[in-house]
Image (spheres, rainbow, N blue to C red):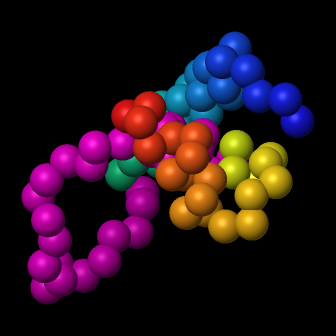
Amino acid sequence: MQTTDYKITELFCVIDDFCKHFEAENGGKLLLGDDTTKRRRRKASLSDSEIMTILLYFHFGTFRNFKHYYLILHQGDF
């Protein structure tokens, strides 16, 4: 599959709209871990939409592992 900036942007917009709708509908209903687990309080550097877009394009590609895909195509983008 030939990837273009337009296709990536279009896919990201669809995924972002889905994530916003999902969060609005199910934000208070999600199961969380127990409160005794230590967690970082730092905000993630990538949004859920960005992560899902990267993973979907990895599955569309011909790379054998995610590390090579990420290093070659996406490391400098963010």
Q: Is residue 64 magenta?
A: no
Residue 57 image point, x, y percent: 70, 43
The quarter of the picture where the C terminus appears is top left
Front position in the image: 77 or 48: 77
The tally of labels here is 0
Direction right: furthest residue: 1
53 above or below 71? above
Name above or below for residue 18 compared with residue 72: above
Relative horizontal placement of residue 11, taking residue 42 as reference (left or right) = right
Task: Specify whether residue 38 is painted magenta.
Answer: yes
Residue 28 percent coordinates (x, y): 36, 51
Residue sitting at x 16%, y 71% = 39
Q: Is residue 24 visible?
A: no
In the image, taking residue 32 as reference, residue 5 lies left or right, namely right
In the rendered image, which quarter is residue 75 located in?
A: top left
Residue that appears at 66% across and 26% down: 8
Q: Nearer the viewer, residue 47 or 2?
A: 2
- Looking at the image, residue 60 sits to the left or right of residue 34; the answer is right
Residue 59: image location, x then y, percent: 76, 54
Residue, x 42% and y 57% (percent of image)? 29
Q: Position of residue 45 (x, y in %)?
A: 28, 43
**Quadrant of the rendered image containing residue 2:** top right
Which residue is drawn at the image coordinates 42% and 60% (left, top)?
30
User: Over which residues does the magenta segment extend?
Assistant: 29-56
Majority secondary structure of the magenta segment? Answer: loop
| Residue 77 in the image: above or below residue 4 | below
